[in-house]
Amino acid sequence: MLRARLTFSGKDRVMKKINRAGYAAITLSLLSGLCLAGTAQAQPGWGSRWGGGGWGSPWNDSMFPSDRNARGGSMGDAREGKVEVSRFVAQVPQAQELGHGAVSVASETGDGPWVEPSVRRTFEAAIVDALVGAGYDTQHPDGAEAQVTTLKIARMVLVPAEEKKSPISGTAAVGVSNYGTSYGLGINVDLTKPRTALVSTRLDARITDKASGAVLWEGYATIATREGDQKWSDGVIAAKLAGALFDQFPKADPVTPIG
């Protein structure tokens, strides 16, 4: 009986030491978690290039990986702010007049992810500025133009907006024994805001000869931006895409019409 009582007391001292060590470990874990949460930095992901063809070609998002890490997720997306451009010039005699004379500008609407009229006017104005820089006359009487520039502007969501989440999360554990009650708490603090949707804007432009209706030049440019980002207003996006389309105009990849 005496031996049993002495053994019991030894266990009591061991349990007290374990409890003190446990509290110290919990405290160290909490401090480490807070430090790591405060120093976390965004790492960019990587996305594939645009697929698809020219005027009126359907959107093709199958080229992009669906894996969240490949797209970047909440840690950023390599496609954000990047412009992709494709341009083609027809091998026809009228193409020699590209960049000369009077030209008109209009935008189309239709079934699909087209933007509203007020936004289309912003893109039309950007294209007019680009055409003037390319050597065209955009200030002329109605009907005097020799060439017609037709635009299509469309948008689609590449990555949906992130859902709202609680900035503080964690786990708790409670242990009860004959020697008392112990508590364990782990806290994770994330003060980053959920990212808005990543949206792609595509601008198609086609220049045709008014008299014959022949296509002389066409191209499209795309850019991915965050919805609601103040640095990417409609005017900034329109100027960026129009400038990329008509950079070194009418330089483009030559295409021989079929038929």
Image (cartoon, rainbow, N blue to C red):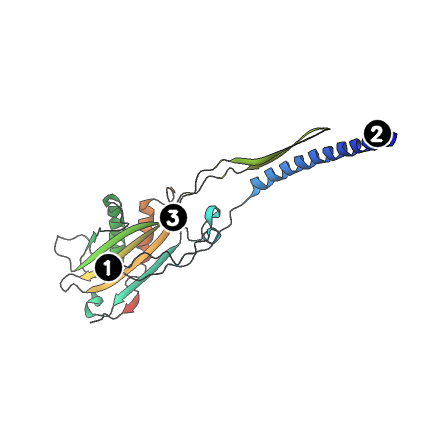
Query: Hey, what amino acid is under mark 3?
Result: Thr
Residue at figure coordinates x 59%, y 37% from the top left: 34
User: Which residue is more in the foreground, 98 or 233?
Assistant: 233
Residue at figure coordinates x 24%, y 59% from the top left: 206
Q: Closer to the N terminus: mark 3 or mark 2?
A: 2
Q: Position of residue 208 (x, y in %)?
A: 19, 61
Q: Disc 1 or disc 2, which is closer to the eye?
A: 2
Q: Position of residue 132 (x, y in %)?
A: 24, 55
Tell me the residue that label 1 is attached to: 206
Residue at figure coordinates x 87%, y 29% from the top left: 2
Element type at mark 3: strand
Q: Residue pushed farthest front?
A: 1
Q: Position of residue 167 (x, y in %)?
A: 51, 35
Q: Position of residue 189 (x, y in %)?
A: 55, 37
Query: Hey, what amino acid is under mark 2?
Result: Arg
Image position of 152 (left or right of 5): left
Q: Closer to the N terminus: mark 1 or mark 3?
A: 1
- Separation of disc 1 and disc 2 at Cα? 96 Å
Element type at mark 1: strand
How crowded pointer 1 is (Cα within 10 Å; few <14, some 14-19, many 20+) is rated as: many
Image position of 155 (left or right of 216): right
Q: Image quadrant for the N terminus?
A: top right
